[in-house]
Image (cartoon, rainbow, N blue to C red):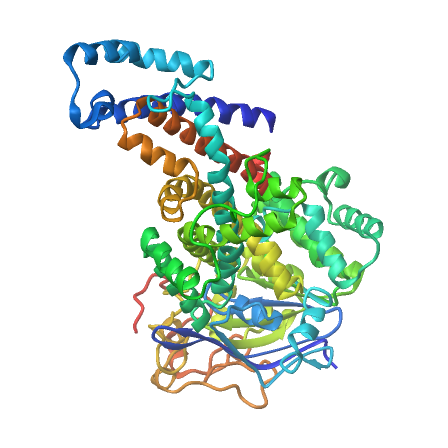
Amino acid sequence: MALLDIEGLSVRFKTSSGLFAAVEGVDINVDRGEVWSIVGESGSGKSVSMLATMGLLPWTAQVTADKMAFDGQDLQQLSSRQRRRIVGGEMSMIFQEPMSSLNPCFTVGTQIDEMIKQHLGGSRKERHERALDLLAQVGIPDPARRIKAYPHQMSGGMSQRVMIAMAISCNPRLLIADEPTTALDVTIQAQILELLLRLQEDTGMALILITHDMGVVAETAKHVVVQYAGRQVEKQDVKSLFANPRHPYTEALLSALPERAGDQDRLPTIPGVVPGQHDRPSGCLFNPRCRYATEHCREVEPVPAPDDPARTLCHYPLEDGVSPSPAAAGVARDNPQSSPHREVRP
Amino acid sequence: MFKFFLIKLAQLVPTFIGVTIVAFAFIRLLPGDPILLMAGERGISAERYAQLESQMGFDRSLVVQYLDFLKGLLHGDLGNSLVTHAPVMDEFMSRFPATLELSLFALAFAVIIGLPAGVLAAVKRGKTLDHTIMGVSLTGYSMPIFWWGLLLIMLFSSTLGWTPVSGRISYMYFIEPVTGFMTIDSLIAGDWGAFLSALHYLILPSIVLGTIPLAVIARQTRSSMLEVLGEDYVRTARAKGLSNFRVIMVHTLRNALISVVTVIGLQVGLLLAGAILTETIFSWPGIGKWMIDAISRRDYPSVQGGLVLIAFIVMIVNLLVDLAYGVINPRIRH
């Protein structure tokens, strides 16, 4: 039984122009102690699907799923009280903006203590000791002094360490990290990632890392979900994903890595942007930016082939780096994105 | 924190000097003359007028008069009333507790009802309860005080007979003034009947005076709560698995209070201004009624002294609000 088992997760937002499907058909099944990564550009619904799992979306969101279970408990059937016992205790989350994610009115110690009190209990002294331990564990120097600090007295990196300390304070079995390094300095980013991986190994918790950085995926995750415009387009373990991307979007993301670009003068890019609420194309959502797109792609929405373990959302999944699409005939394998700045056709 | 207090205190000095100039000039800019008003319809001879003018010091230049006023102020002397000849300070102090008591009860009423109403409206935003609370508070805000006061008197005092129409306490009781607060004095005297009577007399005037501040506080609380509810740290609080009550009352309200406290502080000035009307409606023996009488008699020392004292009190309250910030918001304290 998977620790987190989600099938067919959809999130729709009520907007003035009707319902907007921010996430549709996302499946994820994380086993105990596994490290997963969800990748995709901004606007691909990575955060939203995890916020939906945690139950943190605003009231305008409608969350539906064929299955949404944590450790065998159906999250959709639980009362809000039962669900709060899981959220924060067994399944916790850290966010993109550490500076604004801590309450400016309370000290670091108070905010960690509150969480321990909620889920673990214990005497005031025990909780204080635990908070000090946690701060030391996440690499905060001089915890005895820092525990009395207010969030505005700390840097972004320190704040994120505090957020991590808080998130792991109740020994969660799953930690969701939503772009935990995006708002930080490059030098701090690596430290925070290392810290997360070390804690994951030490505690044996499962980790879901949301990122838009394929480099981070390669260094951290065992399994990868690729999302595009709210759809899950591919799901593979990290080795085969890097060796054999199935979806053209994954291939394009990988070829944009400097390490893979080889000797080209320009780093390949994916032309265009992720479609928003009002400019969603017909057919496959990726077709305006896909170099293999055919008339068929522009008209018919793809569904994953039943026998495809990667559940690739594409009419022509790549086989060993080669697209069976009729449109691929003219595209040379060695030079992906031969003209990176070509015009995007709607 | 002490340094912060001293800086804030020093900032009050220029404001206070400005207030003295305005208070001094304001009453003299009004048409009318205290001596002519005292003389009444029979008129006064030119010699007697000149004699009185020099006796009261009004024959000197305005600058000299102003400096004289300032000099007295520094010694805590606001001069004597032209009408009663009693020191303005004594006249003010004997009436001020009545106004303060009324204002505090009105403010308590406004905060106790307005704050939860604002929180409730924010939590239930877009629902019927939200629209109802905001609609009622807008009505309360738009209502003229004197009309609202008369309406309540007609309903609760005349028709239902639940509350008294005017005064501070039933004539059955006589309470020796110690603090000047009827409620506290009656407790000091150990007279429960008098205490209840004093509360009974406070109900309607407090509601009338507190209605506008209540509306302002409710609206400010709602908008401030809505703003904070969208903050990342509120999402963090939910991610911690805290109860909805704790997320709202601890993590959201605490931050929303920062701007609400400012608004509550600003209401104190409005309360003292509103007290003038409310006291007139309910014949409440406070400074409001006293100031109106002093203005109509062109009692220069009483008016300028009264204005300066009221302004001083408002400034002190705002200073306290600034200090309260430091307590609520650690970003200012450190």
Q: What residue is drawn where x is 45% and y is 23%? A: B89
Image spot of residue B137 (x, y percent): 40, 60
Q: Looking at the picture, does residue A9 appear above or below residue A143?
A: below
Q: Give whichever of B165, B95 is nearer the camera.
A: B165
Q: Number of numbered discs present?
A: 0
Q: Quadrant of the C terminus of chain B?
A: top right
Measured along the vertical axis of the image, is residue A94 above or below residue A2? above
Nearer-the-camera pick, A97 or A283: A97
- Measured as percent of width and height from the top left, residue A322 is found at 49, 77
Is residue A71 visible from the viewing direction of this image? yes
Task: Pick the residue in front: B227 or A287.
Answer: B227
- The x, y position of residue B125, in whole percent, is 45, 67
Would you say A139 lies left or right of A312 here?
A: right
Which residue, as the protein is rendered here, is positioned at the far bottom? A306
Given residues A31 and B279, the one toward you in this image is: B279
| Quarter residue B271 falls in | top left
What residue is shown at x 33% (from left), y 72% (from top)?
Answer: A279
| Residue A177 horizontal side relative to residue A294, left or right | right
Q: Is residue A7 shown above or below A219?
A: below
- Residue B291 picture quarter: top left
Which image quadrant: the N terminus of chain B? top right
| Image position, residue A105 (x, y; %) | 60, 46
- Residue A152 seen in render: no
Please state if A278 lies on the left or on the right of A133 as rendered: left
